[in-house]
Amino acid sequence: MAKLAINGGPKAVNEQLGKAMYSEWPEIGQEEKDALMKVLESRKWWRGGYTEENLEDSYVVKFENAFAEYQGAEYAVACTNGTQAIELALKAVGIQPGDEVIVPCSTFVATATACILVNAIPIVVDIEPESYQIDPDAIEAAISPRTTGILPVHNGGFPADMDRIMEIAEKHGLFVVEDSAHAHGTLYKGKGCGTIGDFGTFSLQMGKTLTCGEGGIVLTNDEELAAKAYSFHHIGRFAGRPFYEFHLVASNLRMPEFQGAISYCQTMRLPEQTERRDKNALYFEDGLREIPGMAPLERGDRCTRWGFYYYMFKFISEEFEGLSREKFFEAMAAEGVGLGQGHIHPIQQNPLFTKRNFGPVCWPEGIEPPDYAKVETPVAQRVMAEEVCTLGHHAFADHDTRSMDLILGAIRKIRENVGELL
Ligand SMILES: Cc1ncc(COP(=O)(O)O)c(C=O)c1O
């Protein structure tokens, strides 16, 4: 008689994982309803409806202050989305046409396209095999006379090696913008992701752990950079100057008050939600360590709190009797646990890059982007094809460890009966 569900045996998991949140995500309550009604009835639906005297009544400002405090930054500017948050940060640090910005290959495409949208050239590099984050050695190897910045991503919310990245940046006089779209609540050695480089940028898109449907925010500890980001998101106005006085060529990237109201209320919920997910993740990691062929990303002293958008762990085929990850995924799905792999291939393999289909960019004459079709990132290619496993943040949302036990139980069942799959 087959034991594994893929072969007709009974399923290990017959219920919704992360029940506490899955069907009711995002968590909402009276606070969100009251805040939305307050905005509606105030008839001030944008931050411009507030003056110096009553600025603290703006929900966008309340959100900026609350999120900056939670993540541990001095200044924040809320904006339209996570892609434009990166563009905003790059403009504020003074990006120039043709500047090279080093980005990891293991990320969402927006990390690199945001560079192109401000006429910079993304230089795509490989990741570390252990952490799946941008490899500092690869950053150093990619530095050229045209490099002006590093754009690390805390992929899956796990922190990049910020000590080494900041060291390299200092040595070569580069700016650092941390794409923290996945890392709300993550602490790197006790410091909030997005507060270590010149800027941290966040997405509040619907899938994220902090969401208002669509939105973004940039954080910084530098007053001058904060003022520039404010201006670049506000059509080039300077705070405190006349309304029709403009100083920079800039777009309108303002977050509306309705989005501010939701973002603020959700930020109030975020600390408890992050602790809940991280507690479950730590329990899950202990379980993974006991199963041959499975391993967590080891946090060491680097990740002191993991605020993840998707949770990443490792499938090691050689220690799993040579089973392929694809077969493991199929068997897990049959047991009732859907696993993913995060980004399916390194970003430079998208047609956008291989065909250099960049539209109207303005690079100085003679400056060409690399031939992305030839950019090899062997670590990421192997990890993405064979090793990484992901679970959405919802699975970690319960107030108890039941979902963790169910997932671990399904993995153990497959491990114990792997012979049925070989
Ligand atoms: C790493 C990363 N950077 C940037 C973004 C862009 O954010 P948005 O979708 O809010 O524009 C995303 C979106 O998922 C992302 O995953």
Image (spheres, rainbow, N blue to C red):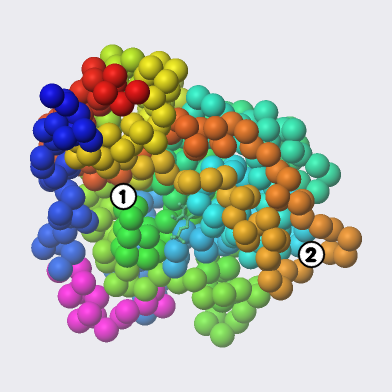
Which residue is pictured at 31% across the width and 63% down the height?
A: 212
Q: Are marks 1 and 2 in contact (CB under 8 Å)?
A: no
> Which residue corresponds to mark 1?
209
Mark 2 belongs to which amino acid? Trp
Q: Let me know if residue 323 appears in the view.
A: yes
Judged from this view, the residue extending furthest toward the front is 1
Residue 194 image position (x, y, % from top left) = 48, 44
Q: Which residue range is magenta in the image?
A: 34-48
Residue 110 image position (x, y, % from top left) = 54, 57
242 on left or right of 354: left
Residue 362 image position (x, y, % from top left) = 76, 69
* C-alpha distance separating marks 1 and 2: 36 Å
Q: Main secondary structure of the magenta part?
A: helix
> Which residue corresponds to mark 2?
363
> Assess mark 1: CB under 8 A from ligand 1?
no
| Front residue of 68 and 327 | 327
Q: Which quadrant of the view contains residue 186?
A: top left
